[in-house]
Amino acid sequence: MYDRDPDRLRALGVAGSLRTGSYNRALLRAAVELSPPAMTIEPFELDHIPLFNYDVEQRGDPEPVARFKHAIADADALLIATPEYQQGVPGVLKNALDWASRPPGKSVLQDKPVAIIGASPGMTGTARAQTQLRQTLAYNNCPTLMRPEVLVARAYEKFDAEGRLTDEDAIKFLRELLVAFSDWSARVSSRG
């Protein structure tokens, strides 16, 4: 799945939206394109992950869940692009993290460095969703990069019709976050 160069951070990229034309999927694509030479970002789609159900889990993880857990375990870090729905994290993203958090205390998320980015049509970007997401990640003891923040507000003005990030300020902030994330992850993870 990843380039096995030990000097490169291997990040799994997850967009918390299922919509094909999602601003957050577009933001994640921009992150892949803008990632520094010391980083590889491999996107993972959440489309087929079923709703968490303890009874199903007791029979074994469904194949899409097993693939997601394996991808997280194989990565050095996690980059999450979250939308903001009803001032919080979208259900599809929370559900995927609920699956990944199992079994408690031994999950693939345990101690995994995470950076959060987000885009929204609203005026505050995804500030509330990012705060809520940090709370969820804290349960799994995930160190989470606090700054720089990427909160793309009024996203309909920042992407072109093909979904390319065109706003120079947003591009600058995203580049800064990716460089900081690469350096910081190496210090806080077992890679450092």
Image (tube, helix red, strand yellow):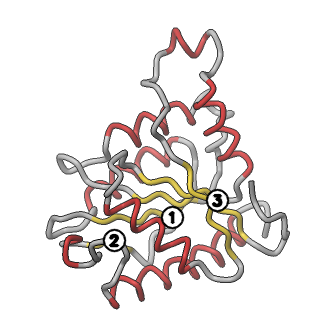
Q: Position of residue 142 (x, y in %)?
A: 57, 52
Quarter of the image that includes the N terminus: bottom right
Q: CA distance from mark 1 to mark 3?
A: 8 Å
Q: Say what amino acid the circle numbered 2 marks.
A: Glu
- Label pair 1/3, CB-CB below 8 angstroms: yes
> Which mark sits nearer the N-terminus, 2 or 3?
3
> Which mark sits nearer the N-terminus, 1 or 3?
3
For disc 2, the marked residue is 162
- In front here: 164 or 49? 164
Q: Position of residue 150 (x, y in %)?
A: 37, 74
Query: Label 3's element?
Result: strand
Query: Label 1's element?
Result: strand
Q: Say what amino acid the circle numbered 3 marks.
A: Ala
Quarter of the image that includes the C terminus: bottom right
Above or below residue 67? Residue 178 is below
Q: Say what amino acid the circle numbered 1 marks.
A: Ala
